[in-house]
Image: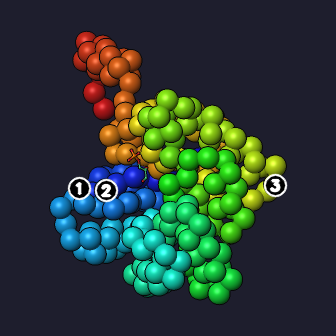
């Protein structure tokens, strides 16, 4: 499973990249606004920092022509740009037309909450699809169940669109995404940190260090 970080904070991206586990970055307007930086500056900094990894950047236009125009402009910002396009009728049409025109724009159909939306994203040839599992949980439904069905449908028909499990809230979401065989999980910084921390590792290390001292081990 590829690991993307779901953030627009440069320091978080750098830290996870330098740990050697980062495969890509996803942003959205909310995440960029949290940085307090002007939108374009924040995006350009990220693109520069991870030039060999896909970075999802979201459009704000809502009509097909506007989405296509913005998508083409965003794609010019860097070879690693993936344009995030909402799963609306206008958005799906924009993805279809960008592909038909061979515009060379990689797309990520976002704000996906159902298997049928994901099916349509694949049909129009999206590069990625982003089901939001945490937000499904928020409305007292099961986000992982939705995701599982999407994975099943994609496997049944051999769709090439890659699934990015998004809106991940905790480590158990990540574990279950991995067990489902999802292509990618985009994970907030805080949750990535929790993935490698374990109280038994910390307790075990403390004990080993204490015993090493007692045994006089020094290398
Ligand atoms: O980037 C999209 C998605 O991951 C947002 O997550 O926590 O705002 O539902 P959240």
Please state the horizontal and vertical placement of residue 196, each as a whole percent of the image.
40, 34
Residue underneath mark 3: 157
Gap in angstroms between the C-alphas marked 2 and 1: 5 Å
User: In this view of the protein, which residue sits in the foreground, 210 or 193?
Assistant: 193
The C terminus is located in which quarter? top left
Please state the horizontal and vertical placement of residue 3, each as a whole percent of the image.
49, 50
Gap in angstroms between the C-alphas marked 3 and 1: 39 Å
Q: Element at badge 1?
A: helix
Describe the colour scheme in one phrase: rainbow
Q: Earlier in the sequence, mark 3 or mark 2?
A: 2
- Residue drawn at 46 percent across, 81 percent down: 66
Q: Element at badge 2?
A: helix
- Residue drawn at 45 percent across, 71 percent down: 62
- Residue drawn at 29 percent across, 52 percent down: 12
Please state the horizontal and vertical placement of residue 140, each as a whole percent of the image.
49, 29
Mark number displayed over residue 31? 2
Q: Residue furthest right?
A: 156
User: Could you tell me if the residues under marks 2 and 1 are in contact, i.e. CB atoms within 8 Å?
Assistant: yes
Tell me, yes or no, if residue 20 can be seen here: no
User: In this view of the protein, which residue sits in the foreground, 64 or 104?
Assistant: 64
């Amino acid at each position: 499973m590829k690991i993307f970080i779901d953030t627009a904070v440069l320091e978080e991206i750098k830290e996870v990249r330098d740990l050697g586990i980062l495969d890509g970055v996803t942003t959205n307007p909310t995440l960029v606004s949290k940085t307090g930086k002007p939108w374009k500056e924040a995006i350009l900094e990220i693109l520069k920092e991870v030039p060999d990894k896909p970075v999802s950047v979201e459009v704000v236009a809502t009509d097909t022509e506007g989405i296509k125009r913005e998508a083409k402009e965003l794609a010019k910002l860097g070879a690693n740009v993936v344009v995030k396009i909402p799963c609306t009728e206008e958005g799906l049409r924009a993805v279809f037309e960008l592909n038909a025109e061979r515009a060379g724009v990689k797309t990520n159909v976002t704000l996906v909450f159902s298997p049928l939306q994901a099916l349509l994203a694949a049909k129009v040839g999206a590069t990625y699809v982003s089901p939001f599992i945490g937000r499904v949980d928020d409305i007292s439904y099961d986000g992982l169940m939705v995701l599982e069905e999407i994975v099943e449908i994609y496997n049944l028909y051999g769709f090439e669109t890659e699934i990015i499990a998004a809106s991940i809230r905790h480590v158990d979401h990540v574990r279950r995404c991995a067990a489902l065989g999802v292509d990618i999980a985009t994970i907030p910084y805080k949750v990535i940190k929790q993935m490698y921390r374990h109280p038994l590792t910390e307790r075990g290390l403390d004990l080993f260090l204490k015993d090493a001292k007692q045994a006089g081990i020094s290398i």
